[in-house]
Amino acid sequence: MNEPMDTADGLLDENKLIALRRQKLRELRQRGNAYPTDFRRDALAAELHGAYGDKDSVALEAENRRVRVAGRILAKRIMGKASFARLRDMSGDIQLFVQKNALPEGSYEDFKNWDLGDILGAEGTVFKTKTGELSVKVDTLRLLTKSLRPLPEKFHGLADQETCYRQRYVDLIMNESTRATFKLRSAVVAHVRDFFNRRGFLEVETPMMQPIPGGAAARPFITHHNALDMQLFLRIAPELYLKRLVVGGFEKVYEINRNFRNEGLSTRHNPEFTMLEFYQAYADYRDLMDLTEELLRGMARTLLGDTLISCQGETYDFGRPFRRLTVREAVLRFNPTIAAADLDDLDVARRIAKGLGVNVQPEHGLGRVQLDIFEQTVEHQLRDPTFITAYPTEVSPLARRNDTDPAITDRFELFVGGREIANGFSELNDPEDQAERFRRQAEAKAAGDHEAMHYDADYIRALEYGLPPTAGEGIGIDRLVMLFADAPSIRDVLLFPHLRPE
RNA sequence: GGGCCGUUAGCUCAGUCGGUAGAGCAGCAGACUUUUAAUCUGUUGGUCGUGCGUUCGAAUCGCACACGGCCCA
C-alpha cells in the first residue's frame, strides 16, 4: 500500500475512455514526435483581453493582429465545418474559432479527434465573434501534449474534496476558486517580504534539520543522518537560530519557511506548516504589536481592498486599532463568575480548570492553570483582532520577564476569529535566566513531558556573547491565508495537504 | 481517541418496502460554418469502497475494516 504506484497498479483504474486516448497517442507516435517542444507562443489570454477586449470587430479587423497561443483545451463545440474551443493558459481563457476551410488539409479532422484536456498550440488572428467574444481565428493548430485522462464534468466540475486534495492538479484545472486561493497565498507571502524588506529586515534561511529542536513546545519529527550517524530533528521553529543571528549583528531578520510538528491532523493543523518569524533589536513587544497591526492592516487593504475581512460568515475589522487585554483581564471579562483572587490561589484555580474539563497535572503551576482557563473560556470568543498580553512566565520559557511582575512575561498573542494568528515577545536575553528556564524544561521533559524543551547549550553560549534587547514574533502564514481566503480548513490553503495514503 | 455523516459509470448525482443498476455531462457514431452548460438523432459504459454475515434473493439490513468530511477531546 505504501509502495510507489508502478505500472501495474497504474493500470488498475484504466477504463475505456483512457484506453481510447492511449490508442490515439499510439497513432500520434506513428505519425512522428507525439510530444513536440518547438512551439513558441507570443501571447497570453489575459494579455489579449487586456489589449483588445474593448475594441470592436471593425477595429480588430483593421488591426489584423496575428498571435500564437497555447494551453489546455477545456471546451469544444463542434458545428459541422466550424468549431469553437476554449483554451486555458496560466493567465486565463481565450476562445478559439476553428474553421475547416482556414486549416491545412486534414487538420480540422485531427482537431475534431482531439480530446478535452489536450494541450495545443494555435496560431491565427484576433477577432470578435458576433456575440462580442474576443477570440482567435485559427489557421494553424498543433497538438502539443496528449491528455490520457478524462477531465471531470464541465458544469459541476470536481466537487469531491478528497480528490481535490489528493489530485490538486485536477482541482486546479477545474476550480477557479482554488486557483484564486493559491494566487492569494502567493500575494500574502509577497506582501510580507515587501513589508519587511522595505523596513530594512534581512531575509535569512536557518536549518530545517536541527540537532536540538528548539523554539517551541511541540513533538518533533526525528530523522537520521547516515554519514554522521546522528539523530536529527525536523525543526519545530527557527527561533533560536534567528536570535543567534541577532547576536551576530543582523539586528533585523526574518524567515518564511516550513515548521514540522509531529501532531495530529485537523482543519487547523498540518504536520508541516509555514511560519513567518521576525526579530528586531532595540524593540520590545509593544513595538511588534504596532508593527503587526500595520502589517495586517496594510495587507488587507492591498490584497482585499478593504480592512473588513469576511471569513466563514463573520466579518473582522482590521481597520480599527486592535483590542489589547492581558490574559488575566480577558479571563475575568469573559468569566463573570471568576473573581480576581481566584486566579491567584492555585487550589481555587485548579478547581476552576478541572471544572472546565482541563486535565490538570500535579506539576502544573498557577501560570499554566491560568492559561488553561484562558484557552478554555476566552480564546474562541476573540473574534475581531485582539492582542492578549502578559502571559505567565511558566508557559513562556523564551520570553523576557516583566520588569515589575516576574510571574508574567512581556509577551502577546494575536487572535482573530477565535484562532491564534501570531505569538511574539520581548526576548529573554539574560543568559543566566535562560539557562535556568532550560533546566526547568529539561526536568519536565525528563518527567515525561514530550513537548518540553531541550537544554540548548550553544544557544546559551550565544546569549553569553550578548543578545541586544530584542523583540521577536511568529505569524502562522497558513492560518493567515485561511482568514484572507475565507477557507474553512487548512487543507484548502495547502497545495498538497497531508492525507493518509490512498 | 470518541460521535455523526458519506463512499454507486471518467465526473456530478438519483436509486422507493430487500426482488436482475438509473439520469445528466463526458465518450462513441451521425447531422450542423458564430457557439459559449451549443443543439438534434442514435449509442457504449458498473468489483454499488473492501470483507464477513443475515436472507430464496443485498447498492439497500447487520458487523468489521479502509478512506474522506463535520463536530468533540
Image (tube, coloured by chain):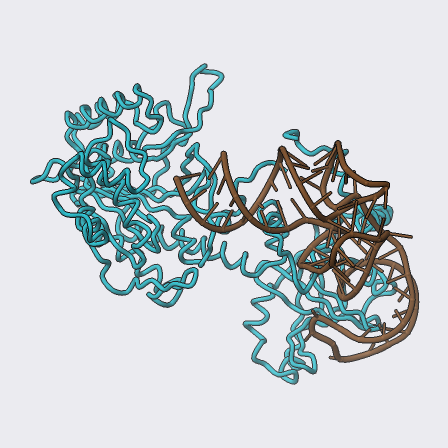
Chain colours: A cyan, B brown
Quadrant containing the C terminus of chain A is top right
Q: Residue at x 53, y 40 (%)?
A: A498
Q: Nearer the viewer, residue B58 or A71?
A: B58
Q: Nearer the viewer, residue A443 or A127?
A: A443
Q: Nearer the viewer, residue A271 or A79?
A: A271
Q: Nearer the viewer, residue A357 or B29?
A: A357
Residue B45: x, y in percent? 85, 51
Q: Is residue A325 visible in the rendered structure shown here?
A: no
Q: Residue at x 73, y 55 (%)?
A: A118
Q: Residue at x 67, y 63 (%)?
A: A87
Quadrant containing the N terminus of chain A is top right
Say which quarter of the image contains residue A435.
top left
Left or right: where A444 falls relative to A497: left
Left or right: where A305 falls relative to A375: right
Residue A167: x, y in percent? 62, 47
Residue A296: x, y in percent? 31, 57
Q: Is residue A244 visible in the rendered structure shown here?
A: yes
Q: Residue at x 34, y 24 (%)?
A: A212
Say which quarter of the image contains residue A245.
top left
Q: Residue furthest left?
A: A404
Q: Residue furthest bottom?
A: A58
Residue A253: x, y in percent? 28, 42
Count of number-bearing discs: 0
